[in-house]
Image (cartoon, helix red, strand yellow):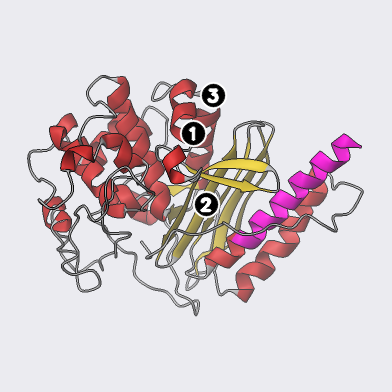
Amino acid sequence: MKNYILCFCLILSVSGIAQNTDSVSEFAESLDRELPKRLAEKNVPGMAIAVMHKGKIIYKRGIGLANVSIRERVTPETGFNIGSISKLFTAWGVMKLVQQGKIVLDAPVENYLSRWKLPAGKFDSKKVTVASLLSHTGGISVHGYPGFPPEMELPSLEESLNGVNGPVRANEKVEIILEPQTKLKYSGGGYTILQLMIEEVSGMPFSTYMKREVFRPLKMRNTSFVLSKGILKKSSLPYDEKGEEIYLERFTAQAAAGLHTNLEDLLTFVKANFHGSEVLSRKVIDKMREPLPITKGFYGLGYLHYSFGGIDLHGHTGSNTGWESALLLDFKTSSGIIMLSNGSEGEDVLKGTLRQWVKWRSALKTEKTK
């Protein structure tokens, strides 16, 4: 995971929009024109994208290449690593345990840990609650994690928490570095603690728990924290800033950055967000996406909050080497956008596409008020 949140906090000007609002078909045609050009400009081989509007999928495409060397096209079934969007799914896994009465949100996370404890220091570890880790207000270190090449042996979860994370992040252990529950401090390390907590409470490996309790009930059949042969067979390949193929990273810190999925499964997840499911009720989801005051309106329990052009969006973005992604939902209108790309320069592609979508949405609102 790159050492920052993929930041869509940009000013989206809606001035100069044509008075005659584009129809859905015209909007789709504009995306068909613009997206290939954006991908080519940034050396990003391909992307998968879906746009929802008032509960309906109005645009769903695979664009460009999943594998450049064999000219394999991206489709809605093509797999992508989704970086920090993994945290959103981890939050669902935690909240499932909360619904079952196995975890209390406001309890110290150490109540559920035996294999590892937060290092002793000047801050009170009892203030590091489950909710504070979900909302990045626990004061925890390690913003993001590097991935490991396929030939390297992954450190154990406990080793990772103790700072064994390879040459890029060597000796950066997970610890309390700020007074807990005083401010937002984005921390992949906090989600690694949650990964361990899920294992201890459920008695299962994290990836197994997530498959059984979240992905399988939602019928997300091509989503996994484990890069199995089946997942790899359907996956696109990652590419660097020059558009050159690179290796697909592996992660011990799966909860923070390691999820692999495709567009079709994410559309299933979006439906579960809007309507609730056997995994989480809509009431619980609404609670999760509500930003905590301490985060200044930016983060809830696993959900990022963005406001663009008068539209409130909840979801998450993701950024790993060779991958850029976003899943942003407007719960008020059951609308949203999912974008998955397999290039390190995909951020600008996604930003440009987000601008285009928000301008179209804003034009619809302007036309309606006339």
Q: Is residue 222 visible?
A: no
Residue 193 vertical placement versus 237 (above, below): above
Q: Nearer the viewer, mark 2 or mark 1?
A: 1
For image coordinates 35% across by 37% down, the residue present is: 91
Residue labelled with disc 2: 326
Which amino acid is tagged 1? Glu
Give whichever of 335, 41 is nearer the camera: 335
Q: Position of residue 331 (x, y in %)?
A: 60, 32
Which amino acid is tagged 3? His
Instruction: Work out whether mark 3 precedes mark 1 in sequence or the reverse, and give the earlier one.
Output: 3
Residue labelled with disc 1: 290
Q: Nearer the viewer, mark 3 or mark 1?
A: 1
Quarter where residue 149 is shown = bottom left
User: Start and end of the magenta stretch?
Assistant: 351-370
For image coordinates 45% across by 74% down, the residue present is: 240
Quarter where residue 24 is shown = top right
Which amino acid is tagged 2? Ala
Q: Is residue 164 visible?
A: yes
Give whichever of 305, 328 is nearer the camera: 305
Q: Secondary structure at mark 1?
A: loop
Give whichever of 334, 45 is nearer the camera: 334
Extreme-left residue of the structure: 114
What crowding class fits label 3: few (fewer than 14 Cα within 10 Å), some (14-19), or many (20 or more)?
Answer: some
Q: Position of residue 98 (x, y in %)?
A: 29, 25
For image coordinates 36% across by 53% down, the residue present is: 185
Instruction: Work out whether mark 2 precedes mark 3 in sequence or the reverse, and give the earlier one.
Output: 3
Q: Horizontal placement of 24 versus 154: left or right? A: right
Tell me how far mark 2 sits from mark 3, CA to CA: 20 Å
Q: Is residue 168 magenta?
A: no
Residue 280 vertical placement versus 196 (above, below): above
Specify the label residue 275 is tagged with: 3
